[in-house]
Image (spheres, rainbow, N blue to C red):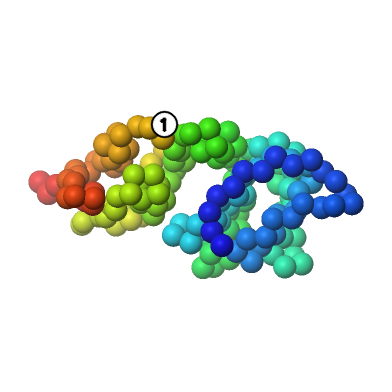
Amino acid sequence: KEGEAFFDVAHNPQKPFIVNYDGMQTVVLGTSFNIKAYKALGESSVTVKTGRVMVKKGKQELAVITPNIRLLRNDKTENVKLAKADAVTASAWTTGKITFSDAPFSEIVMRLKDTYDVEAELQGVSEEQVRLTATFEENDKVEKIVEAVAGVNELQYRIEGKKIIFYKTTK
């Protein structure tokens, strides 16, 4: 139902390769591409590395996307937008990297939970104010990511067991 997958598929008109997710379809037109669809993020995305794919919702064609283009779909509004993207970064997780590309706090929290089994929360800061663009190795210590989040967003943090709390200091 949710997750992330990277595909490298040869085009075969007699046997189309179609990925169904979150009420949408990606029809392969001979390509390699990444699909990210996590409920916690509130959006799904398709990023093409090579070739091209068609993204559909039901019978409606949303877009045909080509290399280094990302289709983003907001889960609540169902608005769709196309943006430039680094396809290598989008699929870096397949080579043991943890990448954040202008990632919202919800994605940071999800990656920390999945990779390090820790929770994270904000105190006195709205989620919209916290973003991160960075790449880490899967074997990096959690503190390296936490320090990057804090440093880039001018936050302090404390660790309480398996919970990381980010906050702003008042002057």
Q: Is residue 118 left or right of residue 80?
A: left
* Residue 86 visible in this rendered orientation of the protein: no
Between residue 144 and residue 95, name the one nearer to us. 95
Q: Is residue 95 left or right of residue 108?
A: right
Q: Which residue is drawn at the image coordinates 67% and 43% (left, top)? A: 7
Residue that extends furthest to the right in the rendered view of this protein: 14
* Residue 124 visible in this rendered orientation of the protein: yes
Q: Is residue 167 above or below residue 79?
A: above
Residue 121: x %, y % from top left: 27, 55
Between residue 54 and residue 5, name the one nearer to us. 5
Q: Which residue is drawn at the image coordinates 69% and 64% (left, top)? A: 57
Residue 42: x %, y % from top left: 48, 61
- Count of numbered circles on the image: 1
Q: Quadrant of residue 125?
A: bottom left
Q: Secondary structure at mark 1?
A: strand
Q: Is residue 2 left or right of residue 65?
A: left
Amino acid carrying mark 1 in the image: Glu
Q: Which residue is drawn at the image coordinates 23% and 50% (left, top)? A: 162
Badge 1: residue crowd in 10 Å (few <14, some 14–19, many ≥20): some
Residue 154: x %, y % from top left: 24, 41
Residue 41: x %, y % from top left: 46, 57
Q: Is residue 39 left or right of residue 132?
A: right
Between residue 79 and residue 5, name the one nearer to us. 5
Q: Is residue 55 above or below residue 169?
A: below
Q: Quadrant of residue 149?
A: top left
Give the residue pinned by disc 1.
137
Q: Which residue is drawn at the image coordinates 48% and 34% (left, top)? A: 96
Locate the N terminus and report the quarter of the image it occupies: bottom right
Between residue 27 and residue 72, name the one nearer to us. 27
